[in-house]
Amino acid sequence: MESHLIVAESASEPGPRPQPPVGYIPTPSAPYRQHRKAAALVLEPGPPRIGLGAEPANGFGQGVRVLMWKQDPSVQDIGTRKAYLPGLVLDGPRDARIAHGEPGIAQVSPNAFGDFVCMPDTPQFDAVHAYAVVRQTLTMYQRALAAAEHGTPLPWQWNSSADLAPIAVFPYGLPNVMNAFYSREQRCLRFGDFIAPGQAARVLTCRSLDIVAHETGHAVLDGLKPDWLLAANPPQTAGLHESFGDLTAIFLCLSQLDQCEAVVAQTKARLHDKTFLADIAEQYGLALGRPNGLRNADNDITLSQAGNEVHALSQVFTGAVYDILADLFALERDPGLRDDAAVLHQVGHYLRGLVLRALIAAPERGALYVDVVNAMLRLAEADGRPVSYRNAIRDRFVLREVAESAAAPGVDHQDGLMLAPGVQDAPGARQDRRACCGTMNLAEYHAVQQPLDAELQALSDWCAGHGRAAPPPAADGGKAGAGAGPASA
């Protein structure tokens, strides 16, 4: 193919154009690139792409790029970055499983490149960020189950063959409320905002990857174990729900290689050093004057110290899993052969799937920590993992008083051995949810309708006994007497 050198002509120096030297390659200037693209489209169409890897002709389904907080807004080392979502995303943003629910935010449409990249500190950015975290969380757990051959779809609690409604996301759903929640009755996630005492900046919980992932974790687990959110369960069952929310935030970080690299760099590969991975909802915690976010996964709380307060209870299970993560990372780490971030990413992937499968294997109601621990041990053995994995699981939960074991720490766990429970809830113990997130405090999970129904039934019985039975329907279909006073109400 001939190349042509473009040279400006001069009226004072007429003559033939100079020819380019042999072997000349033109500079890839902007006009040249534009010319080549136009030529490729108009003059030199390529053969149609068929078979695996073919791109859709209309561009839909190729995935989108989004701009989002990759961690909590206060974690400045990471900040906002572009992320790629491989599925089909439509105006909203929305997809088959997640809907745009905020009436105060106009639907966000993709830009000229088909992406949802919005300016930070705008309602559109917040809508995209919240959607992206929910989508990443759902996809992460679907992949975990697909790898375990359980099938990929994860239902929301209300889903059935006749009801495939998505979950709605409301980034500004709780104005001036210092909380966030998942509601199965409203079929949504709602996030609050507040100004902390003595501070000028408003904290928006929808901007926290930790908080959005936590609430999405409640929704995911409620779809798998619908009875677990009810307050009639033992305290440890509620602790599993709250812990799963915090672990979801940790697992979502570990599912992203750039965050694994940041953790390794921040801690020099020592996961028990202070790290944003263990700190949950840093900005929220800082607004309340706490140094480690709302909660710290790298803790030493035991069951006997936690009592029945659900958030304290949850930190026992979360802390044990975080310790297991650090132990497995230390077992697998080999800087001479593999990058530390890649190892952390791999260990996080396995532990995420192990915890999720163990929760699924636990009882449908009244589940205790030891039920999940024994399922983790059984699954790790079935997966063919080294006995050192089971040793770490057993030892960490024994140290937290969750289970009892006759074997000393470090002694290999006996295959098939079921651990006995350690510290247990007292008979009839009731959950203390007062310090929990908004999800655990919604009336819909506390069976409050029963006393209301009982009061209304008592009123109905009294009315029936005092001659206030319901009048027969009017001949004109109930229109007679409309508006005739209190008796017609």
Image (cartoon, grey):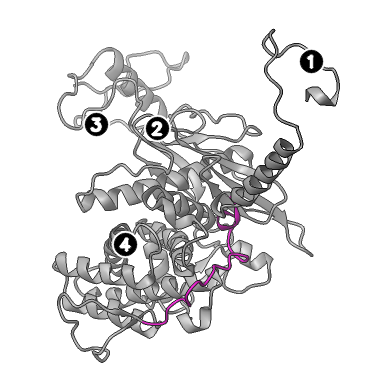
Inter-mark Cα distance, 3 to 1: 93 Å
Residue underneath mark 2: 164
Left/right of residue 23 with respect to residue 37 in the rendered view: left
* Residue 297 image offset from top left, x and y in percent: 47, 72
The answer to if 440 sits in the magenta stretch is yes
Residue underneath mark 1: 482
**Do we see residue 70 in this rendering?**
no
Disc 1 residue type? Ala
Inter-mark Cα distance, 3 to 2: 61 Å
Label whose residue precedes the other's in the sequence (3 or 2): 3
Inter-mark Cα distance, 4 to 3: 71 Å
In magenta, the rendered stretch is 422-443
Specify few, some or many for label 4: CA neighbours under 10 Å numbering under 14, 14-19, or 20 or more: many
Left/right of residue 345 with respect to residue 189 in the rendered view: left
Specify few, some or many for label 1: CA neighbours under 10 Å numbering under 14, 14-19, or 20 or more: few
Label whose residue precedes the other's in the sequence (4 or 3): 3
Quadrant for the N terminus, please. top left
Inter-mark Cα distance, 2 to 4: 26 Å
* Residue 248 image offset from top left, x and y in percent: 42, 58
Residue underneath mark 3: 24
Task: Check if mark 3's residue and mark 2's residue have beta carbons within 8 Å.
Answer: no
Label whose residue precedes the other's in the sequence (3 or 1): 3
Left/right of residue 197 with respect to residue 267 in the rendered view: right
Task: Check if mark 2's residue and mark 4's residue have beta carbons within 8 Å.
Answer: no
Specify few, some or many for label 2: CA neighbours under 10 Å numbering under 14, 14-19, or 20 or more: few
